Image (cartoon, rainbow, N blue to C red):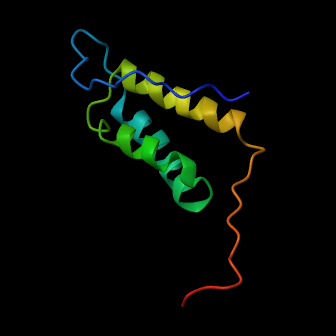
């Protein structure tokens, strides 16, 4: 089962005293998720874009949020998004 979305507000200023994460490793994961969001998983686009803001200086809280998003992907890999075309369009 997919982990539930986090409903608490994300405060980007909550980084005092946290341990930094390797920016290259963080950016590599962000780029992979961005590729997925453009190609096959539009449902993660907003989350990936929010996390990408911290690519230059990620902290542990950002890495945890990134792992949460990966957990969501693992839990929803068998679900599909169907968009059906309407037969009678106004165009």
Residue at the location (26% across, 31% down)? Answer: 57
x 41%, y 35%: residue? 26
In this rendering, the answer to whether 17 lies above or below 24 is above
Number of numbered markers: 0
Q: Which residue is drawn at 71% across and 83% down?
A: 87
Q: In this view, does 81 lie to the left or right of 30?
A: right
- Coordinates of residue 8 in the picture (x, y in percent): 40, 21
Q: Where the N terminus falls, by quadrant?
A: top right
* Residue at x 78% of width, y 44% of height: 78
Q: In this view, does 48 lie to the left or right of 3?
A: left
Q: Residue furthest right?
A: 78
Compare residues 90 and 46 and report the one nearer the observer: 90
User: Could you tell me residue 27's position as x and y percent?
Assistant: 40, 41
Q: Quadrant of residue 40?
A: bottom right
Closer-to-camera residue (29/50): 50
Q: Which residue lies furthest to the top in this view?
A: 17
Reply above or below: 87 against 84. below
Quadrant of the image for the C terminus? bottom right
Place of residue 14 in the rendered image (x, y in percent of width and height, measured from the top left): 25, 17
x then y, percent, for residue 6? 48, 25
């Amino acid at each position: 089962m997919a982990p539930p979305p986090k409903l608490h507000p994300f405060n980007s200023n909550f980084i005092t005293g946290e341990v930094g994460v390797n920016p290259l490793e963080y950016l590599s994961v962000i780029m992979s998720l961005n590729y997925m969001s453009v190609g096959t998983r539009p449902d993660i686009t907003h989350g990936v874009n929010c996390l990408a803001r911290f690519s230059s200086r990620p902290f542990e809280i950002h890495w945890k949020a990134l792992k949460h998003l990966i957990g969501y992907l693992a839990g929803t890999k068998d679900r599909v998004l169907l968009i059906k075309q309407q037969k009678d369009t106004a165009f």
